Amino acid sequence: MKLRLYQVDAFAARPFEGNPAAVVPLEEWLPDGLMQSIALENNLSETAFFVPEGDGYAIRWFTPAAEVDLCGHATLASAWVLFERLGFKGKRVSFSSRSGELNVGRKGDLLVLDFPAQPARPCPIPVGLVEALGARPAECLVNIDLMAVFDDPGRVERLKPRMNALAAMDYRGVIVTAPSRDYDFVSRFFGPAVGVPEDPVTGSSYTKLAPYWAERLGKRQLRARQVSARGGDVQCTVKGDRVLIGGHAASYLEGDIDLP
């Protein structure tokens, strides 16, 4: 049995930038354990699987360690595969998921995710966070992920967290963010609890980041940079209870998975 596999760099204008995702189109779902094994073998932050459903597709995402409820960059990569490799003719592809309906459309050469906003609520700085990050944030907020806000973008770039300490905290991941002169804001995402020490560009994090910075800066359209080693530019628009997250994608490889 062979399965087609695509590796796509999402939020990237060219290969070797942005966030690599594996995409495996299916006609029907594989057993969960097999999809988890494929994700572990791929050893990327996310592997996306999708199957036809009605006029669109159902999508699921796996890190090397676990299935997750929402992943932006692998959804962007999946839409790119449908548009560029599988002959999808519509202007917008619709995915059903654990997080509801997710749409990806085209705006020129940009792919735009339409995701539900997930505004984070203020919370006390958790015990152990300062020691885990090596720095004290100005404030913290939470919604599934913890968001630590700093005043200095340079501090965000210089952080060298203790991953074991972050993994022990009760969050899917930890977002760190700060305002920026060159962009509206910068961020990083650490997810050691789900097998991703640092994610290069994390589409789902902008469902929390964009509402926060839109309110703080008094603007709906935002330019962001995820300042990981690979890095990636993200365009965000807050539209009611939705966040539009735009980026480019670039193909890296295509091949087949051989299953016994």
Image (cartoon, rainbow, N blue to C red):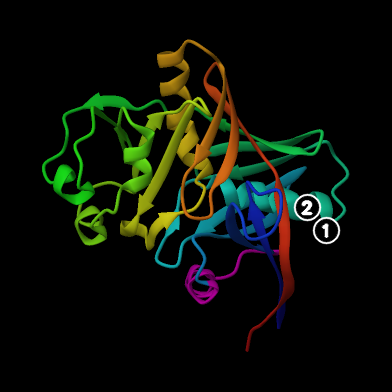
- In the rendered image, residue 89, in percent from the top left (x then y), is placed at 88, 44
Residue wearing tag 2: 82
Residue that badge 1 annotates: 85
- Amino acid residing under circle 2: Leu
Q: Is residue 23 above or below residue 178?
A: below
Q: Is residue 27 magenta?
A: yes
How far apart are the alpha carbons under marks 2 and 1? Answer: 6 Å
Asked whether disc 2 touches disc 1, contact meaning CB atoms under 8 Å apart, the reply is: yes
Asked if residue 162 can be seen in this view, the reply is: yes
Residue 221, magenta (yes or no): no
98 displayed left or right of 65: right
**Pick the front one: 115 or 253:** 253
Provide residue 138's location: percent of width, then percent of height. 23, 27
222, 99: nearer the viewer: 222
Q: Secondary structure at mark 1?
A: loop
Instruction: State whether residue 259 is above or below residue 73.
Output: below
The region drawn magenta spans 26-42
Type of secondary structure dominating the magenta stretch: helix
Residue type, mark 1 in image:
Arg
Q: Is residue 82 left or right of residue 173?
A: right
In terms of image quadrants, where is residue 152? top left
Q: What residue do we see at 50% from left, 71% from top?
A: 43
- Location of the C terminus (image quadrant): bottom right
